[in-house]
Image (cartoon, coloured by chain):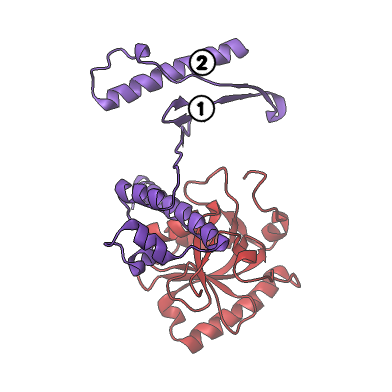
Chain colours: A red, B purple
């Protein structure tokens, strides 16, 4: 990564069991950073069992676009967003790989501006209806605490404090 | 899906996304500056492009033709600049040939920046050949110049 990439103490994340995820063709001018549990990376690469239908071009592309610092669609309501901040939950976000439908969601939180930490990946069918989705998403707050202790997630103005200038807010 | 297929599909999607991202940045900037709406963009693009179609482009990953890219650039009053970097050598190409070469010393401190001239027609073995041959001829000529420039700098 170049000097322009967001600085984060990756040793803290490494000791919590996260690894930095890069697009399948990384760019030297990447500006956003993604940290995932190794099992999520295996899932995205089609190495998990059961495989979950990965790898998919759509998941590769949304991760590529995110890391490159390009335009991402963001929302608190829309069903078309790449990133959703989930309502009524404290800083729980979903990185959405929507195709092939209904797709998958990587639930996590922002550690710092432009630094997303994915805690767990769910088949959208497993998340199911709103109540179940919300319960599982709420579990991410505990999951964060287990991994990162008292470290607080990043909190800022939606959406640009999280994703930089190049976030297309579908709610506007 | 093989790794090669995965990479090829990824490259396609990212190429599309690059243009969407580029125009989204321009539109966002113009909106902030005021007096710009998606309706105005749709009108500039012509009657066939309704506002909802133009807005929909930014909700998906449109596979625009180069004509659409040109029309968008025209409507937004943009001059598009394009360059390509050879992943194996780092050489950056523009439609005019090889871009400036930066020769780095210890600690990646730039020590020389030199303009490498684009090829001239006399560099080409035969200008009466198909365009792809001309491109490879141009590339060859420019690469030779680059090596010469590097030798002189050394």
The residue at 44%/19% (across/down) is B142
Determine whether A90 is above or below A27 in the image: below
Residue B151: give its label: none
Determine whether A129 is above or below B110 in the image: below
Query: Chain under label 2?
Result: B
Residue at the disc numbered 1: B99
For the question of whether residue A51 can be seen, the reply is no
Query: Chain under label 1?
Result: B
The residue at 70%/53% (across/down) is A7
Residue B122 placement (x, y as % from top left): 36, 11
Between A158 and A116, the one lying in front of the other is A158
Residue B148 placement (x, y as % from top left): 52, 12
Determine whether A132 is above or below B29 in the image: below
Residue at the disc numbered 2: B147
Determine whether B127 is above or below B39 in the image: above
Mark 2 and mark 1 lie on one chain; the one further toward the N terminus is: 1
Q: Which residue appears farthest toward the front when viewing the image?
A: B35
User: What SS does tag 2 mark?
Assistant: helix
């Amino acid at each position: 990564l170049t000097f322009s990439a967001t600085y984060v103490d990756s040793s803290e994340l490494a000791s919590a069991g996260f690894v930095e995820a890069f697009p399948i063709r990384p760019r030297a001018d990447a500006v956003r950073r993604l940290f995932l549990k190794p099992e999520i990376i295996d899932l995205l690469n089609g190495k998990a069992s059961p495989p979950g239908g990965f790898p998919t071009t759509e998941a590769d592309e949304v991760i590529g676009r995110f890391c490159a610092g390009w335009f991402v669609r963001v929302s608190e309501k829309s069903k078309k967003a790449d990133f959703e901040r989930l309502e009524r939950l404290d800083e729980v976000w979903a990185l959405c790989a929507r195709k092939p439908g209904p797709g998958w969601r990587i639930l996590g939180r922002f550690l710092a501006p432009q630094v997303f930490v994915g805690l767990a990946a769910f088949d959208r069918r497993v998340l199911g209806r709103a109540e179940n989705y919300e319960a599982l998403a709420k579990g991410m707050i505990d999951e964060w605490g287990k991994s990162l202790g008292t470290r607080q997630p990043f909190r800022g103005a939606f959406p640009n404090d999280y994703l930089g200038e190049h976030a297309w807010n579908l709610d506007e | 899906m093989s790794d090669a297929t995965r990479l090829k599909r990824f490259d396609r999607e990212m190429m599309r996304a690059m243009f969407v991202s580029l125009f989204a940045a321009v539109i966002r900037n113009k909106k902030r500056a005021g007096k710009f709406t998606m309706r105005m963009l749709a009108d500039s693009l012509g009657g066939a492009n309704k506002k909802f179609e133009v807005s929909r482009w930014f909700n998906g990953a449109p596979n625009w033709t180069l004509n659409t890219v040109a029309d968008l650039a025209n409507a937004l009053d943009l001059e598009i600049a394009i360059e390509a970097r050879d992943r194996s050598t780092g050489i950056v190409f523009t439609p005019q040939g090889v871009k400036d070469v930066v020769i780095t010393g210890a600690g990646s401190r730039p020590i020389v920046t030199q303009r490498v001239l684009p090829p001239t027609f006399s560099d080409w073995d035969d200008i009466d050949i198909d365009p792809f041959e001309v491109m490879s001829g141009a590339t060859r000529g420019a690469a030779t110049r680059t090596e010469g420039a590097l030798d002189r700098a050394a």
